[in-house]
Amino acid sequence: MKVSEYYGLGRGQAGLRFLDVDIEKDLKLFLNAKAIRSLGTPWADHCEELLSTFFNQVLQSIKSGDDQTALGLLSVLKEPNETHLGLSKGESDGRGLGPKKAKEIWTAMKRSKAVKSGLLTDLEDTVLLIDGVSVDIVSDIITNIIRGPLISYTQETCAGLGIPMVKDVSSGPVWNPKTLGWEVDYVDLPAPNDEKLILIPKEIVRITSDYDVDAYYRHFVLEKLQTVEIEENTALVHVLKSRSNKGRKRVYKTDLMAKYGTEKKAVIIEQTDNYPELFEQYKAANSEPSPVLTHRQIADAQDSPPPDWDKLLNDVLELAPGKKDAYKYEESIQALMEALFYPSFDTDTYS
């Protein structure tokens, strides 16, 4: 059952600004740091402050050898089940974020040359440069760090839509950028089936990370290794004999994979250490955030039908003029406008 159904909101996903998640299952979408930055609102600026201060504190602690502080900061991170985003909860292989995974990430960052050299600067960089970090882990980390603003967003949204909230619910760890530490408060939050719920704006999620391991591996790392092999005239170099390419040297990527290994993340980390300019080039080529998800992309992720535009319009047109249906008209017209002008429809919420 989705949030809109549980609370009888009378709107589908297109007419809602937040992700209409199932209150029991996970939706395979992920929070995206670049998407948050691209909003350009005070709410987004606050989120960015939280993300940057947390990650900088972890990096500085590792660089200075303050292992206790770095591990302590990371150990608080846990899988945020209250958002119902990501992969299935309770995975047996330890993939989900928790104390074990946090320690693995700390160990990988402590060993990382990219951390020591300053090449790794943003949280999303870890998808490419830190072993054991994937798009779902980064999304969970982001959720933990910006939990405070997400709670405020949830409260404002619930107040606007009349969703009841339970008082004095534990907020979970909230990052304080001034004290550079985690705090816990008691807040008002919706709690369907007695499980607290935090709502997520549609604009800040994506299907995957903006940084693609496969693309970086194939089009940057392997192409660099091709150049290196040719320059050093190794045994991997083939001299072409065809009339059109006679004398041209080529190194096949399959041969590179056989020599350097097929574990993409491991090869990426090792070769980025050797050629840090590759990562800088990749980041420059991928500096813009991926586009906001369309109505259809969100519907596909939810395994739901796309927006019913006729219904959205008829919900407005079928109402009788006058005071009796004034409230229903306001609700229906807002749902229609939200759907039509998404993602540009502006409200006071999280602006």
Image: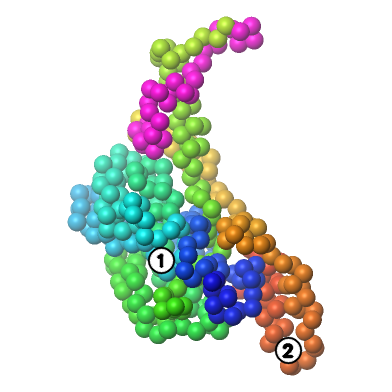
Give 216 or 2, whichever is nearer the viewer.
Answer: 2
Which residues make up the magenta segment? 242-271
Label 1: how many residues lie within 10 Å, few (<14), some (14-19) or many (20+)? some
Which residue in the protein does label 2 denote?
Answer: 325
Q: Residue at (59%, 80%) from the top-left corner?
A: 8
Screen quadrant of the N terminus = bottom right
Q: Name the kind of residue labelled 2 in the image.
A: Asp
Q: Quadrant of residue 299?
A: bottom right
Secondary element at image label 1: helix
Q: Are marks 2 and 1 in contact (CB under 8 Å)?
A: no
Which residue is label 1 attached to? 81
Q: Looking at this view, is 205 or 52 the one in front?
A: 205
**In the image, 208: left or right of 176?**
right
Residue 302 lies in magenta, yes or no? no
User: Where 344 falls versus 197 (above or below)?
Assistant: above
Query: Mark 2 packing: few (<14 Cα in 10 Å), some, or many (20+)?
Result: few
Can you tell which quarter of the image residue 82 is in? Answer: bottom left
Confirm whether residue 248 shows in the render.
Answer: yes
| Residue at the image position 70 percent from the left and 78 percent from the top | 332
Q: State the quadrant of the C terminus.
A: bottom right
Of labels 2 and 1, earlier in sequence is: 1
Could you say whether the residue bearing mark 2 is in a helix, strand or loop? helix
* Amino acid carrying mark 1 in the image: Asn
Taking the image as shown, residue 4 lies to the left or right of residue 217, namely right
Where residue 54 sits: x, y (%)?
A: 34, 59
Residue at the image position 56 percent from the left and 84 percent from the top? 162
* Colour theme: rainbow
Q: Position of residue 163 (x, y in %)?
A: 53, 82
